[in-house]
Amino acid sequence: MVMMTMPVLAILRADEGGPTSPFEVEFGLFFWTWLVFGVLLYVLYKFAYPAILGATEEREKRIAGQLSEAERLNAEARTLLAEQQKLSAEVRGQAQALLVDARSAAEGERAATLEKARHEQDALLDRARREIATEKERAILALRQEAVELSLAAASKLIGERLDGPGDRKLVEDYLATLSRRG
């Protein structure tokens, strides 16, 4: 049965106008296939290819422009970064220099203030010593005067006369001076 169906199919295909074997070439079909392919190729070449090519070229130009812009911006960013680092280093250097200057100025000011305070202290001590010496001299003079007065009063009580004269006073003062030289 299987054998019988094969020849029947071959006959039916021959009647339909199709090839009887897969290796059989039919020239009419071949010609029209190539003709349709050529027309389609011409239409695509004439209308679609320029639009596709233009869009592709425009895209390539846009991408190239974006790449060059990116490279330019990258170079600019590197330049700005280097400039910023340089400025930062300069600012740090200036800040360090200012700190050193400020420290040295503060140290100089401190030394000057201490020196001024020492001078003022020494001047104050000298003035105080002079005042003390002056007051001491006044006190000694006052004590001598008082001693002279007391000595005269005591001597006059002993002698029984009043000793007020300048000669008497001179005698007592000389005696007290000799006592102060000894002591």
Image (spheres, rainbow, N blue to C red):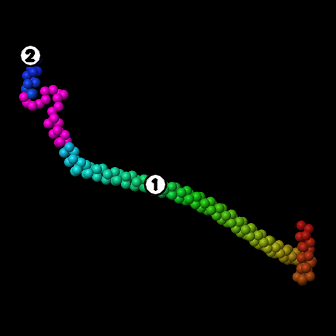
Position of 151 with respect to 37 (left or right) is right
Q: Secondary structure at mark 2?
A: loop
Residue 116 seen in this snapshot: yes
Q: Is 167 situated above or below 62? A: below
Type of amino acid at the residue the image marks with label 1: Ala
Q: Which mark is residue 1?
A: 2
Q: Nearer the viewer, residue 42 or 136?
A: 42
Q: Quadrant of the C terminus?
A: bottom right
User: x%, y% of residue 155?
Assistant: 90, 76
Looking at this rendering, what residue extends furthest in the top direction?
Answer: 1
Residue topped by disc 1? 75
Which residue shows up at 68% across the image and 63% down it? 111
Which residue shows up at 76% across the image and 70% down it? 126
- The residues colored magenta run 15-37
User: x%, y% of residue 176?
Assistant: 89, 73
Q: Secondary structure at mark 1?
A: helix
